[in-house]
Amino acid sequence: MDLSSRNILWRIVALIVGGIFIYAGVIKAMDPVAFANDIDNYKILPWPLAVRLAFYLPWLEMLCGLALLLRSFYRGGLFILTGLVSIFIVASVVARARGLDITCGCFGHASKNWNFSGHLALDLAIFAALIALWISSPRQQQEL
Amino acid sequence: MKASAVRQALLLIALAFVPAIGEAIYFRDKVSWQSPIPASELVTVDQARSWGDNVIWVDARADNEFERDHIPGAILLNEDRWNELLPHFLGQWSPERKIIVYCSAQSCNASREVAKRLRDEAQLKNVFVLDGGWEEWLKDKR
């Protein structure tokens, strides 16, 4: 695969990952109370903090998703999303280990009936894509 | 490169506050900021007892926990078998009685979820959640 096709491939990956986060953010921003309940299900944060995060995180996800799509603040967006997904994977595994019956809330109530393995597989796939984008981004910038 | 990524990230983090604060202001009266259940929807064991027979108890715990023990007269209605159990509950329901939903303890969410579904899906009014759940009921009994 030559360099330009590789760049197109990374561009497509960035578009898909960015799109996923914009979609996830919009769904959650439309129903912040449901998302606050989803955060609260993890039993990690007190409710007053969970409800405030429920208003903030969807917008952060949307902005970072847009950053990937528009390639503006690209590495900043990647940096935040990688951090968010890592925290989320750890929180999910810990909640599972504690025997909590969690609704991840990743895609609002649309993902309510997903099982734990499904959630984890999707999160790990997104995490892998973010790491790949992170590694490929300096090369792409040099070639642009 | 790393420094610019961090700078960009900090800027995105700051920017996200703007719409988030706007949305929080818009929702300020629709959200319970201090507790997952608004105070008006929460009842203590003492309050519930003072309502006497004017109450329908709803047990939102799993079937096996309900079978082990439950508040006398409580009706089982959990999310696992919602569609199956709801008609049975509605058969026992009467509009003049208050509904109090409970789950195992303060930390469980089942009572909150069932109470919400009773209000939103079954369109019932006077639905409350027992503060502290089954655990608190047992403590009060001792």
Image (cartoon, grey):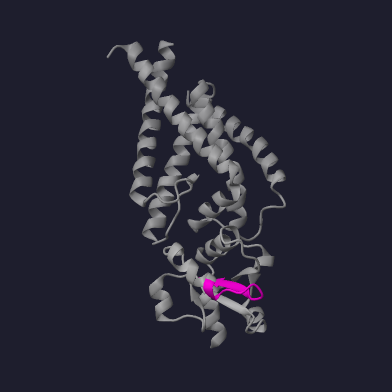
> Hey, which quadrant is residue A63 in on the image?
top right
Q: Residue furthest left?
A: A1
Task: Classify the position of the N terminus of chain A by image quarter.
Answer: top left
* Closest to the observer, B92 or B8: B92
Left or right: residue B52 versus residue A45 is: right
Q: Residue at x 53, y 73 (%)?
A: B91
Q: Residue at x 62, y 84 (%)?
A: B53
Q: Residue at x 40, y 22 (%)?
A: A12
Q: Position of residue B92 (x, y in %)?
A: 54, 76
Q: Is residue A114 magenta?
A: no
Task: Classify the position of the C terminus of chain A by image quarter.
Answer: top left
Q: Position of residue B109 (x, y in %)?
A: 51, 63
Whether residue A55 is visible, yes or no, is: yes
- Indicate whether B139 appears above or below B119: below
- Indicate whether A100 appears above or below B134: above
Q: Is residue B94 magenta?
A: yes
Q: What are the residue bounds of the magenta stretch? A: B91-103
* Closest to the observer, B107 or B75: B75
- Indicate whether B89 appears above or below A72: below
Q: Residue at x 51, y 81 (%)?
A: B71
Q: Position of residue B82 (x, y in %)?
A: 46, 63
Q: Residue furthest bottom?
A: B142
